Amino acid sequence: MKKLKLFAIAFTGVIVLGIFGCQKKNETPTSSTDQTVAQSTKAQIKSLGFSTASVVKTKGGYIVEGDIFLSEASLAKKAKSQKLTVAKSEQYQTTNTVSDLPRTVTISVTNLPSVYSDAVDGAIARYNALGLKIYFQRASSGSTGDIDVAGFDSAPNSNGSITLGSSGFPDDSGNPFGTIQMNTNNAAYGSNPNLDYLTSVVQHEIGHCIGLRHTDYFNRSYSCGYVDANNDEGQSDVGAIQIPGTPSSEDPDSFMLACSNGGNRSFNANDVIALNYLYK
């Protein structure tokens, strides 16, 4: 049975969908394995609160934790001297979340097929149905929203992954991350993308834009089938902070899991608790 890995992003991060089993894909030629990454660079990565296992050098920065893109500029950023206390399997938030509530966040779609636009509408409807103090709506025609959803074309990687999309975390001023990029390559979603699946990915990406990290941040064994012993939060201002009220046991149905089976996945009860804590 194949597993699909749906990962988070940070700063200008990259979400990766990896297909494991007999169906391996091809690696991006500009990337290198972590054997070529200097220990000083790994120390910077750890100081920002990310795992140093399997770091990949790529154009403009590094991919960590299998999917999170850290730019060269972000590595130069000095982390705040705080040690965050995080649990092992609850829902997580970043240090920064969206502020000035209640607040309307507009979302635009730029140069994408209509099914992607429909997916954005579907994701907006899912969030707004929760009655949060953060409300989403489409930006007016011809304008760029607070979050702009655009496309890029990226072929599969030989390491068994393909970039599905990218987004990032809120800034220090309490604004949502401003860009979600969706992969339009046929290898990502096929020539006729499934609307529910696209909606789930956009929904996941919006979650990052407003400050959610992966539910299984410290234990991906139950969603991805592997354990990373090097997941150490370190000293960081990005953060992976436990959200009170979410479970202390595994939550295999959260929409913010690192890995997915490629199907339709929306909020479960614990995701709603997390979003209510942050935005209700």
Image (cartoon, helix red, strand yellow):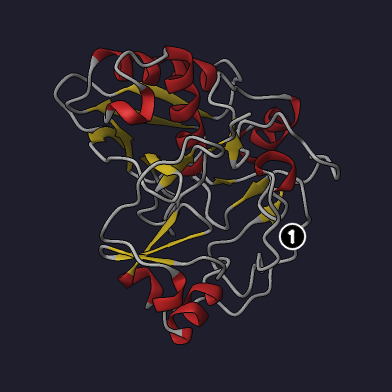
Classify residue 254 by image quadrant: top right
Classify residue 232 by image quadrant: bottom right
At x 52%, y 55%, the residue is 96
Q: Quadrant of the N terminus?
A: top right
Residue 172 lies, with reference to residue 255, above or below; the image says below
Classify residue 222 by image quadrant: top right
Asked whether, in this view, residue 271 is left or right of residue 50, the answer is right
| Front residue of this view, candidates 109 and 175 | 109
| Front residue of this view, candidates 261 and 269 | 261
At x 39%, y 32%, the residue is 105
- Where is residue 213? Give x, y as percent: 58, 47
Q: Quadrant of the C terminus?
A: top right
Residue 103 lies, with reference to residue 227, above or below; the image says above
| Front residue of this view, candidates 55 and 73 | 55
At x 49%, y 41%, the residue is 18
Residue 109 lies, with reference to residue 101, above or below; the image says above
Mark 1 closeness class: few <14, some 14–19, many ≥20 residues within 10 Å: some
Asked whether, in this view, residue 55 is left or right of residue 180, the answer is right
- Where is residue 166? Give x, y as percent: 37, 43
Which residue in the protein does label 1 denote? Answer: 86
- Where is residue 127? Give x, y as percent: 53, 22
Residue 163 lies, with reference to residue 263, above or below; the image says below
Asked whether, in this view, residue 261 is left or right of residue 182, the answer is right
Extreme-front residue of the structure: 22
At x 34%, y 41%, the residue is 156
As shown in the figure, which amino acid type bears the numbered disc 1? Val
- Where is residue 64? Give x, y as percent: 48, 61
Q: Secondary structure at mark 1?
A: loop
